[in-house]
Image: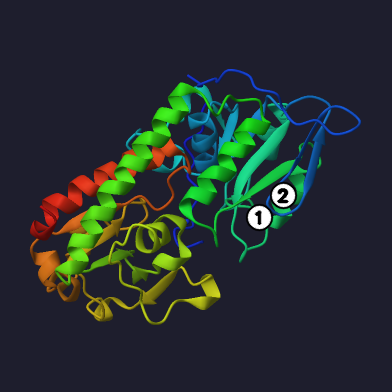
Amino acid sequence: MVSRTRAAGLLVAVAALAGCSAPAPQDAAGGWSFVDDRGVPVRRDEVPERIIAQVSAAGALHDFGVPVVGTFGPLVRDDGSTEPEAGSVDPAAVTDVTGPGYGELNLESAAGLRPDLLVSGKYAEFDGLWHLTAEQEEKVRAFVPTVGVEQSGRSLPETIGAYKELARALGSDVDSERIRADQARFDAAADRLRGIGARLRAEGRSILVVGGTKQEFFVVVPGRNPDLDYYVRELGLPIRTPAHPDTAGGGYFERLAWENAGAYTGDVLMWDTREASLPPEQLKRNPVFAAQESARANRFVEWDAVAPFSYASYADIMTRLADHLEEQSPAAN
């Protein structure tokens, strides 16, 4: 039975597809070995097949041809739809082992899946893994080894490449025609955004990435997020950087009281689509935010903050972003 429990924690950091088999790495003594981005070595007698993964890691692995048996983190929304964070994962095909609190697992359910490996993203600024506290990870290691994939301080292509290489190590044919086609779509979408970025800059226009809860408003720091950093550095999108990031929280956002929601402006507003962040119509209930010209004109585009790191996932995201930027910005037409 698939649990629909959602882990909280918006401002923290944020049928199975099987590929053809490829040779998996072996150590000198035989068996399977892998060293994760933390430098932690993992060894198993056989290539891991029964994998539990944080939902976006599960989505990335799925896109690269590696199925999982269990997930943790936000999987299904209250309306029954799949969380965007889970990407292409079918909730009916996995067991949700999310625990009652943020960073917790239902350890009994997780162990009952008889997993060979647990995979999750890793943010260097925080102990433990994404959606898995260090204390919980220690308990998990009593019955399954863990792999952490670094998701901060590296570019979007590098992060996607890390999941690709993990999938290769797990036996997937990541050079298949399907995955090459996904990468081609990713590259084509990147080229479109590069052209749009050049036109926006030539017009002196800017993009501001924002979100909010009932308690506070926030402006996102592009350089702390692999996707936004890639959009700025490699594709030239003119995304603004706030002046006072919340360094205690890793520097991913500048957090502001709602009365200061007009401290930064942008010609286009990219809004955080996570369920715990307010959608544009609710953001605009704040009169300070609503007074911005771009908000009045409804020049909003989506920011998929916690999407799976795969070519398939970001090909779709970047194509949609290019479409929406062209719709919202006459200068990009």
> Residue beneath label 1, please?
133
Closer-to-camera residue (226/213): 226
Which residue lies at the image location 55% right of the left edge and 62% below the top edge?
153
Q: Which quadrant holds residue 301?
A: bottom left
**SS at mark 2?**
helix
Q: Are marks 2 and 1 in contact (CB under 8 Å)?
A: yes
Which residue lies at the image location 49% right of the left edge and 57% below the top edge?
9
Closer-to-camera residue (234/37): 234
Left or right relative to 51: residue 190: left
Query: Picture coordinates of residue 29 (x, y %)?
Result: 91, 30
Which residue lies at the image location 78% right of the left edge and 43% below the top edge?
141
Closer-to-camera residue (67/227): 227
Mark 2 is on which residue type?
A: Glu
| Residue 314 in sight here | yes
> Residue beneath label 2, please?
137
Left or right relative to 44: residue 227: left
**SS at mark 1?**
loop
Q: How crowded is mark 1: few (under 14 residues within 10 Å), some or many (20 or more)?
A: some
Q: Which quadrant holds residue 97?
A: top right
- Real-space Cα separation, disc 2 to disc 1, in angstroms: 6 Å
| Residue 77 in sight here | no
